[in-house]
Structures are given as C-alpha cells and as structure tokens.
Image (cartoon, grey):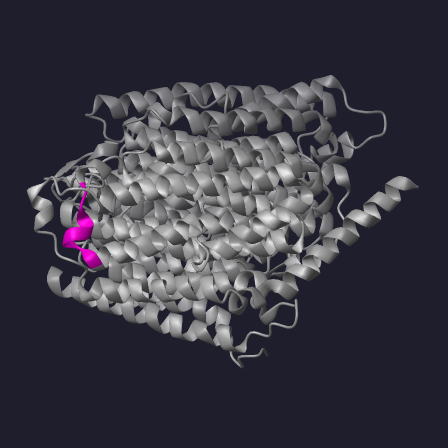
Amino acid sequence: MNWNLALPELVLALCGLAILLFGVIPKRDMTFPCTMAVIGAFLVTGVLVLGQNEGTAFGGQYVADDFSAFMKLLTLAAAALSLLLALDWNQKEKLSRFEFPVLVLFATVGMMAMISANDLMSLYLGLELLSLPLYVLAAFDRDNPRSAEAGLKYFVLGALASGMLLYGSSLVYGFAGTTNFDRLADALSSAQGVSSGVIVGIVFIIAALAFKIAAVPFHMWTPDVYEGAPTPVTSFFASAPKVATVALLVRILAGPFGDVMAQWQQVIVLTSLGSMVLGAFAAIGQNNIKRLMAYSSIGHVGFTLMGLAVGGESGLRGVLVYMAIYIAMNLGAFAVLIAMRRNGRAVEGVQDLAGLGRTDPAMALAMAIFMFSMAGIPPLAGFFAKLYVLLPAVEQGFWILATVGVLSSVVSAYYYLRIVKVMYFDEALPAFDVRPAGISVVLAGTGFFTLFFFLFPAPLLDAARLAVAAIIG
Amino acid sequence: MNAAGFPILSLLTFLPLVGAAAIMMVRGDEAVVASNARWTALWTSLITFVLSLVLWTQFDKSTADYQFVEHLSWMPEFGIAYMMGVDGISVLFVLLATLLTPLCILASWESVRSRVREYMIAFLVLETMMVGMFCALDFMLFYVFFEAVLIPMFLIIGIWGGARRVYASYKFFLYTLLGSVLMLLAIIALWYQAGTTSIPELAEFDIPFGMQVWLFLAFFASFAVKVPMWPVHTWLPDAHVEAPTAGSVILAGVLLKMGAYGFLRFSLPLLPEASLYFAPFIYTLSIVAVVYTSLVALAQQDMKKLIAYSSVAHMGIVTLGIFTFNQQGIEGALFTMLSHGIVSGALFLCVGVLYDREHTREIAHYGGVAKVMPAYALILMLFTMASVALPGTAGFPGEFLVILGAWSVNPWVAFGAALGMVLGAAYMLTLYRRVAFGKITRDSLRALLDVSPREVAIFSPLIALTLWMGIYPQSFLSFFSVTVSQMVQQHQAAIGSAAHLAGI
C-alpha cells in the first residue's frame, strides 16, 4: 500500500473537510475566506502533483504518471480560475455561501481520482464524486426555477449515464474477467480476438463518458443546463470536468482498450463528426450567449475527439494541447459573460454586448481575441489547437474528419463573428457595471495566453508529449 | 547574416506593431488621443517605408535566390520554421505595401473621425500582416499571415464602412476563410509528404500528378477567392463599396495581389503539371472575368463599384498572364499587379476625394467637376488613362506583355485579353466623361474645393510612379526578370521530365 502516491488527492480531500468546518462554525459569511482557502488548497495540491512520484497504488486502482500530472494541473488551474470568477458574482446574486467553493473542491477531488483511475471501479468512484457536487452546483441558485430545472435535468440524465457506465463496466468485467486497466490490456491483446460482449461494454462506457463531455448524440442536456445554471457554475462545467473526462477517455481508449482500436474508432469518428457539425450549425440561431457557448463547446469537443479518433502519439498530443488551449479561451470568454451585468442585474443576451467596443474597449478586445481564436484564425492560440489535431488527422488519412472539421469551423466562424460584430459594429448600449478585479485578472491572463501562444508553443507541446508518452509507453 | 546586415524583413514586418502598441498606450481625452494616434501611425508607417527602401537599393537583381533570408526555429518537431526572405517576385510587393500604408493613413486623416485610435491600430496591424505575408518563406508562416489579414480588414470594413458594412464584412470574411481552410488541409498534406513547410525545400520536392491535382484545386479555392476570379468575385464589389476609402485602397492595392502572388509562389513552382493541366480552365475563367466584369462595370451607377469590377477584370489579365508559363506572360502579370496596385489605389483615392466633399459615390450626382476642380480633373484623367493602359502610363507595359505572352500560347486567348482592354477604355472613359465633363447640374457642385495640399501630397508619389512605370518600366522589370526566367526554365524542365517519364 503506497499512500504517499495519492498525497495530492488526500491532502485536497482533507483540506476540503477542514474548510467545511472552518466555514460552518463562525456565524458570519465565510464565503471569501473559504474561497481563498480552497484556491490555496488547489495551489498546494498543484505543487504536490508536480512533485509526485510515478507508480501505481491501492492494489493497482490508482496510477500516477506524467499524463495524470499534466491533466491534474490543467484541472486544478481551471477550477481555481472558475472559483475566482464566481466570487464576485455569487456576492451580487446573493448566492454567497461557503459551500460553493467546498463543492467545487470535492468535485475537483473526484476529477483527480478519475484522471488517476487505473481500474473501472476507481473510475466510477471518481466520476460519481465529480458528478454529485456538480448536480448541486447546477441547482445552486435554488430559488430560480431555471437553475433548479438545470440541476434536475443534469441529475436525471447524469444518473442515466452513470447507469450506462456501470452496465458497460459489468459487461467488460464479465467477458474479460477483470476491471484493472493493466490486466484488461493483457486480456484484450490476446491472439484469439475479443468477444463481442467486451465491445458492447466499451460502447456503453464511451456513451457514458460522451454524456459527460457533451458529445453528440449525448449533448441534449448541455444547452439547457448551461443556460439554467448560474454563469460561474457554467464556466466551471465547461472547463474542469471536460478536461478530466477527456483525460479519462484518452486513458482508457489508448490504454486498456488500445488493442481494440479498430472497434471503437468508428464510434469516436462518428461522435466527432456529429459534434463538429452540430456545434457549428445549432449555435447560429442562438440569442442567449450561454446557449451559444454551450453549442460552441460541443463543437470544440468534436475537434478534441478528432485527435482521439486518429490516435497515436501525435493525435493524442493534439487532444491534450487542444484541451489546454480550449480551457484558456473558454474561461476567458466566460469571464466576459460573468462581467455582463447592467444596473446590478446579470444579462445574457448576445445583443447585450452591443457597443462594448466603445464602453469597455479592454474587455471587448479580450472577447474579440477569444472569439477569433475559437473560430481558429491565426495567429491566435485556437488556430494552433486546431492545427495540432488536423496535422495527425491528415497524416493518417482521415480526410473526411479533417475536411468536415475545417468546413464546420468556417460555419462556426459565423457566430463567433456575430459576437465581434455586436461588440464593435452595433450602436452602444449603456455600459456594464464596473468589472471586478478577479475578472480582470482572469481576462488578462487568458487573453495574453491566447494572443501570444504562437510565440512560445514549445513548453506546452513538450509537456503534452511527455504526458502522452506516459500512457502510450 | 544578409545584405542589409540586420534582420530587415522582420523589422519591416513588426515595426508597425510597435507603433500600434504605442497608440494603444495613449491616454487622454478623445481629441488628443485621435491626434496622437494619427501622427504615431503616420510616422511609424513612414519610417517603415524609408526602411523598406533598403530593399530597393540593396536587392541583388542578378540572382533568383532568396535574399535577406532570416531563419529562426519555431516548431522544429513539425519542420515548421520562422523563415523570411524575398526574391524578385515578392520584393516589390513589400515596397507596394509599405508605400500604400502611409498614403492610406494620410487619406483617412480627416475622413475618419470616430474611433481614430482603433482605426490606426487596425491599419498598422494590417501592414504587419501584409508585409509578413510577402516575406514568409515557410508555407505555414505564410498561411498565418494570409489568414490574419482577415481580422483587421473585417474590422475596418465593419466599423468604418458604409450602410451595408455588416453584410459586406461577413461576406468578405467567410468567403476568404472558406477558401483558406481548404488550402490549410493542402498545406498539411504537403507537409506530410515532404516533411517540411519551407518553401525553398518544397520547390525541390516532386509531387505525384494525382496529388498535384488535388493540391491545385485546394490552392485554387483559396487563391481564386482572394484574386478574385470569376465566379467567386462577388464579395469584392460589396467589400469595396462598403469599405472606407483607405480600406478600398489597401484591398485593391495589396490584398488582391495576395491571391495572384499565391499562384506564382505556390501553384506554379510546386505543382507544374497540374498547373499546365488546369491552364485552359484558368484561361477560360480569366477571359470570362475580363469580358463579363467589364460589361458589368459599364452598367454601374456607383463609382467605387465600377472600379471594383474593373479590378476583377484587371486581375483576370493577371491570372491569364501567370498561366501562360512564359517570360513575357509572367513578367506582364507581375507588372500589371504592381501597376494595378498603384492605379486602382489612386482611383479609389480619387473617388474618396469626391466622397469626402459630397458624401455620395453616385456617378449621376456629378458632372462638370473639371470646371470647378481642374487639378483634380487632371489627376483623375491620368489615372483613368493608366487604368485604360494608355502607352506611357503604368498600365500599358504589363497588359502588353501579357497579351504578347498569351499570343504565343493561343491567339484566341490573346484576343480575349485584348477585348478586355477595349471594354476597359469604354467604361473608364464613360466614367470620366460623366464625372468630369458636361454641365454642372447641382448647386452644391459649384462650391467644390479643389484638391488640398494634403491630397496633393497623397497623389504626387502615385502620379510619379504611374509615369515612371509607364515611361521606363525597365527599372521595375529588372527586379524580377531573372527570377521569372529561372521559374520558367524550372517549369519547363519539370514538364519535360514528366513528359519524358510518361513517354517511357
């Protein structure tokens, strides 16, 4: 038993319990200190992750390697930034409760457990630990019917997905005789082929995970939940859990199920195609910017899955780089969404951004950078994200995927441009309320990353290469 | 390091960005910001232009090699590098871009009143992208600049444009993007085959014919939209009509050249057999463009739209010349690109002069302008004649060479191109007659002021260049004749060896 290996998760979970006590005992509002404490706990955990040894623990249930370190750092960063964004919003919306950061913290523990899962059982454990706080968070604005609806919708469909995951896992266990990833890999690489029961199980597992990352055809909940949940919660939904679940997909598909790639590849190809096309077309008609971002995130997931479908070292590296860049762009864009507040009331129509170029040039510039970047216009980071998945796709001859990908990015450019158009070309509406410092920090950080990524692509690429090497071996 | 002794191309490319950053820092009330932004932008672009004259004096015309080459590692594991350099084909376009930018900034001195700071930043960023694109010696780097041009141009049309600016800017952006992403796939396919995106190395690489055809079509999708060739030219009249004057100047002067430059830089040298295979197709489209858009231009009521259609016709001559694959044709195409850059830019500026005074571009609104604005009428006449390709003006040598080159390929192709010149005379002279001559019908026209000193300052370099290019074209032709002759030889060698292989 090697407890040390799981030190980051253990420390984070203990911090969570301590902060819970710390928050509940005093009689006054403890949101701010609790949020800061949680961000501090994320920082400590990040340092621990950096210093983590490699190896497996808990009887092969848990694995720590370069891949898990990369993904955990990304998750922690996304969660910390989301908390920073939520701080001011929750205060103004009278949602200031210290449970909020604690719930985010426990969800993050779940994500980290998921990323390090080396067994179908620990996978399920992590996924549930992630999901339960998310259900609560979606309904956090409990007096608002839309928020309650979002929570309920997410819970019902999430429970269904969990059921599918369990069913798939049990099928895999029944036909392969083990739930451990390493032994599954051995079992599935046998010469006499794989029984169709395992394949059905894999498809169920993929379906469950596709639900969590909102890939077509399991995307239906996304627009409603994104729209209904409080905006900071949406920004959290769209970032950290996506990273963790994509990480999990990469780990199980490239790891234990790597030898049956021919079987699952077409599933991922179809999901990817569907997500890209739907993300491009469905967002065109949206007037609510949160719904628009929901469809946009579906499109981006499609691009990420393109890298997974192609597979191989360069394909998976494309996935990781895409996730990292997507997180930066997405959190930046959500920072703008959270700052959209006029006369003390949050607004969320696309048209509410009108004339932002005049009333708040800095924020409009940042938003324009994010939108052009998401549309994939060079030299912004989003272009390189797409490039790194297109390179392997063309290399491996996935012409249909690559062509549909670039064409759908042209279609989606239309609605990203629309936001730029509203901000710069339309008549100005009254200015938004003063933007809080936390949002400015996030905007500046993600904006500079998106704008100047092209100057120094090497560190991210190298880190992603190391991470992929850890699971491909 | 190179002939200039310092990384001049990178300096030329990124100096405008420094100016843009400086403008962004300016604080104060609106009038102060506007005035500072104007002067900073003007000085930055003037310094860039003066610096670019180093290229004019130091460029070695006796070699077809890339000069002033810079090489930095960028994404080594993908074989993608930051590589800059110019040869005979690109050097004059760099100068064209650096010349037109300060003129555009001067031209917008008074006509742009709102959001001056953003306007100047957009123009300086645009200059960076244009210069960088002509200097890039790595295909991926080229693509980055080629696409990045869309962002400032989208904003220039959309923010400072006319009534239908939103429609025009969307159309411009999406049309161009659609073509470009297909080219991106082609670049990636090429990268996968050759393992590099460096243009000099790619030129050495033999591509099988089947793949050449696909790559050619993908490149064609991008460059034909940018040129623009008939029938994908429809974004251009819209963009021109809605763009502010300076935006039209840059669009006609430099951005349209990007497509033709792409054909010359990539399609011809990298895909010689496919180019030959598709040449009749290009001839057809070009001649349709020349004849059809000239006829359309005859029917226009809006001055800018008329000049926009004439641009499509002129670019038809250019694509025709490029695909003749002989010395005269390609040199003529290059020369026409340069002269069209100067002349059509100047014509848009001429329209801008009237628009600034009367706020309409309707041809029927004017008449008899020559009586109240004699100097202006003279300037307009010179550029009209240059656009008609009167001998002695910039338009003539290029079109003449193209027709000469086309004759040796197929006299009927030459006939089509020549027909375009006749029709060009028809619509340009009609325009001039209706605007400059006739009776003054409106009272407002009687009070028109002739060109101001600022406007004279804008026009004088363009007038000088137009006459210089017409009277002594050799000082420009000499820049690219060696490069073009080497290109023609390589093309013939490639075709010859392919034919030889097929013979076996």
State the image coordinates of residue A375 (x, y, percent, origin top left).
43, 40
Q: Residue at x 58, y 47 (%)?
A: B403
Left or right? Give the position of A428 relative to A128. Answer: left
State the image coordinates of residue B117 (x, y, percent, origin top left).
22, 59
| Foreground of the two, B377 or B362 | B377
Determine whether A280 is above or below A327 in the image: above
| Foreground of the two, B30 or A196 | B30
Left or right? Give the position of A100 relative to B444. Answer: right
Asked whether B370 falls inside the magenta stretch, the response is yes
Q: Residue at x 42, y 46 (%)?
A: A373
State the image coordinates of residue B462 (x, y, percent, origin top left).
35, 62
Q: Residue at x 64, y 21 (%)?
A: A201
Total labels: the figure holds: 0
Question: Which residues lie in the magenta part?
Answer: B366-374
Determine whether B24 is above or below B218 in the image: below
| Foreground of the two, B462 or B57 | B462
Residue furthest to the right in view is: B504
Left or right? Give the position of A53 relative to B206. Answer: left
